[in-house]
Image: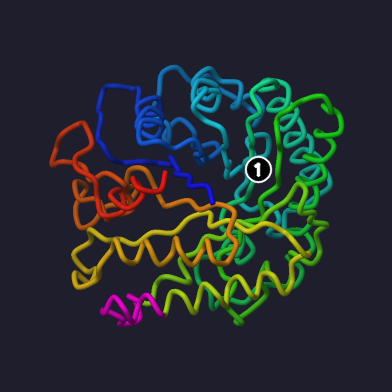
C-alpha cells in the first residue's frame, strides 16, 4: 500500500516575501520520503502555490506546462501525482448545476483531453503515474456542504456527463499516445458513502459510468469513517473500534456498487489534532495505526494523509489545526517539529 501526501493551499510555514513556497514544499515532501503527492489544478493555482514565476494559463494543459508546475511534477523523486482537477477553460464553479450546455461540456472535454495528452507526451520515458480526479464528489453533487440537503434529480444527468466526458477524454488521450510509458488513471472521489439522506455518488453516479479497473479507481475522502470523536467518543479504544466498523461499512458499500476489482484508495483523512476543542485524551499514533492497518486489511491500494503543512487555523491565524506532518514553530518561517501524524508517517513512507 503506497503512501501519499497532498500539497494544497498550505498556510504553514509562513514564508512572506520568499515566493518559493511551491518548491519549498516539494523539497519538504521528497526529503520526508514521499514519492506520491496530490496537487490541485484550478484557477486558484497562484494563491495555493506561491511561487515565482507563474504565467497566465487558460487551460489545464497550459497550467501543467508552466515551468513551476513542471519543476514539481517532473521532479525525478516524484513517481505518482493525483490531481484534483478543475477547469481553467471554463472556470464556472460546478457547471453541472443547471448550466450544463453542450458548448460547456465540449470545452471541458477538449481541455481534459489536451491535459492528458500533454502528460503522456511530456513525461514519456519516466514511467510516472498521474491520477486525474475530482474533489469530494458528493459535495459537488450536492452543490453544498450540508449532507441533509436534497439533490435535485435533474442534476444527476449533468454531473454524470461531466465525469463521463472527462473519462472519455482520458481514454482517447491514452489511445492517441499509445507509445508512452506514462500511466493515466481516472479517479472518482466520493466522500459521503454511508449517507442515506439523498442521491449519492456510490449509488447514483458510479453505476452510470463505465469504470474499468484497468484505468479507474475510487478515491475516498474518508472523514465520515473517522469522526466519531465529534460524536462524543473520547476513549481511544472506543474510537478505534468505531473507525474499523465504519471503514468496513464504507468499503463494503462501495464494492457492492462498483465493478469487480475496481481499486480503492483513501484520498484523504486527518484529524484537527492540535485544535483546542479536540479531545486530548486520544492516542493519535494509535488512531493513525488503526486507519492504516484497516485500510491495508481491506485491500486499499494507497492512502493520503491530509496534508504536508496545515491549510487551516484556529483560533488565530498563527495556530495550525493539526492537519499536518509538521507543526509550525511559533512565528518562524520554517516548519517546526513533527506532529504525531508526522511521527507515524515517518515510519510508513
> Predominant secondary structure in magenta?
helix
Instruction: Answer whether residue 232 is magenta in the image.
Output: yes
Q: Looking at the image, how many numbered discs can be counted on the residues?
A: 1
Residue at x 77%, y 38% (from the top left corner): 107
In the rendered view, does 52 fall on the left or right side of 132?
left
Magenta stretch bounds: 229-241
Label 1 crowd bin: few (<14), some (14–19), many (20+), radius 10 Å: many
Q: Position of residue 325 (x, y in %)?
A: 31, 46
For label 1, the SS is strand
Residue at x 48%, y 51% (from the top left corner): 304
Q: Which residue is mark 1?
A: 132
Residue at x 54%, y 36% (from the top left corner): 43
Residue at x 61%, y 43% (from the top left corner): 86
Residue 151, quarter of the rendered image = bottom right
79 or 132, nearer to the observer: 79
Q: Position of residue 203 (x, y in %)?
A: 72, 73
Q: Position of residue 272 (x, y in %)?
A: 30, 61
In the rendered view, does 21 fall on the left or right side of 76?
left
286 or 78, nearer to the observer: 286
Residue 81, quarter of the rendered image = top right
For residue 285, above or below residue 15: below
In the rendered view, does 115 fall on the left or right side of 342?
right
112 or 89, nearer to the observer: 112
Task: Identify the image's colour scheme: rainbow, by chain, secondary structure or one colour.
Answer: rainbow
For residue 345, above or below residue 41: below
Which residue appears farthest toward the left when viewing the image? 330
65 or 309, nearer to the observer: 309
Quadrant of the image containing the C terminus: top left
Instruction: Answer whether residue 82 is magenta in the image.
Output: no
Residue 233, quarter of the rendered image = bottom left
Q: Position of residue 220 (x, y in %)?
A: 56, 60
Amino acid at each position: 500500500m503506497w503512501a501519499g501526501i497532498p500539497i494544497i493551499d498550505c498556510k504553514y510555514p509562513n514564508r512572506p516575501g520568499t515566493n518559493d513556497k511551491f518548491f519549498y514544499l516539494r523539497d519538504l515532501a521528497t526529503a520526508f520520503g514521499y514519492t506520491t503527492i496530490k496537487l490541485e489544478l484550478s484557477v486558484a493555482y497562484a494563491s495555493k502555490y506561491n511561487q515565482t514565476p507563474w504565467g497566465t494559463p487558460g487551460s489545464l494543459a497550459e497550467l501543467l506546462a508552466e515551468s513551476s508546475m513542471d519543476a514539481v511534477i517532473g521532479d525525478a523523486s516524484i513517481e505518482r501525482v493525483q490531481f484534483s482537477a478543475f477547469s481553467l477553460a471554463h472556470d464556472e464553479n460546478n457547471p453541472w448545476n443547471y448550466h450544463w450546455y453542450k458548448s460547456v461540456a465540449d470545452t471541458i472535454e477538449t481541455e481534459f483531453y489536451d491535459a492528458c495528452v500533454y502528460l503522456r507526451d511530456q513525461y514519456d520515458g519516466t514511467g510516472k503515474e498521474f491520477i486525474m480526479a475530482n474533489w469530494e464528489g458528493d459535495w459537488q453533487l450536492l452543490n453544498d456542504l450540508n449532507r441533509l440537503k436534497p439533490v435535485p434529480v435533474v442534476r444527476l444527468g449533468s454531473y454524470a456527463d461531466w465525469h463521463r466526458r472527462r473519462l472519455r477524454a482520458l481514454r482517447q488521450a491514452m489511445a492517441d499516445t499509445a507509445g508512452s510509458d506514462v500511466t493515466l488513471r481516472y479517479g472518482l472521489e466520493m466522500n459521503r458513502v454511508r449517507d442515506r439522506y439523498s442521491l449519492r455518488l456510490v449509488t447514483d453516479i458510479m453505476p452510470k459510468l463505465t469504470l474499468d479497473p484497468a484505468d479507474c479507481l475510487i478515491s475516498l475522502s474518508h472523514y465520515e469513517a473517522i469522526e466519531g470523536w465529534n460524536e462524543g467518543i473520547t476513549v481511544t479504544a472506543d474510537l478505534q473500534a468505531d473507525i474499523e466498523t465504519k471503514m468496513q461499512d464504507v468499503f463494503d458499500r462501495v464494492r457492492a456498487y462498483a465493478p469487480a476489482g475496481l481499486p480503492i484508495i483513501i484520498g484523504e483523512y486527518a484529524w484537527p489534532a492540535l485544535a483546542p476543542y479536540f479531545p486530548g485524551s486520544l492516542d493519535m499514533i494509535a488512531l493513525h495505526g488503526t486507519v492504516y492497518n484497516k485500510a491495508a486489511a481491506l485491500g486499499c491500494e494507497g492512502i493520503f494523509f491530509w496534508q504536508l503543512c496545515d491549510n487551516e487555523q484556529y483560533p488565530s491565524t498563527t495556530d495550525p489545526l493539526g492537519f499536518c506532518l509538521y507543526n509550525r514553530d511559533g512565528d518562524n518561517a520554517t516548519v517546526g517539529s513533527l506532529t504525531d501524524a508526522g511521527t507515524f508517517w515517518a515510519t510508513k513512507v
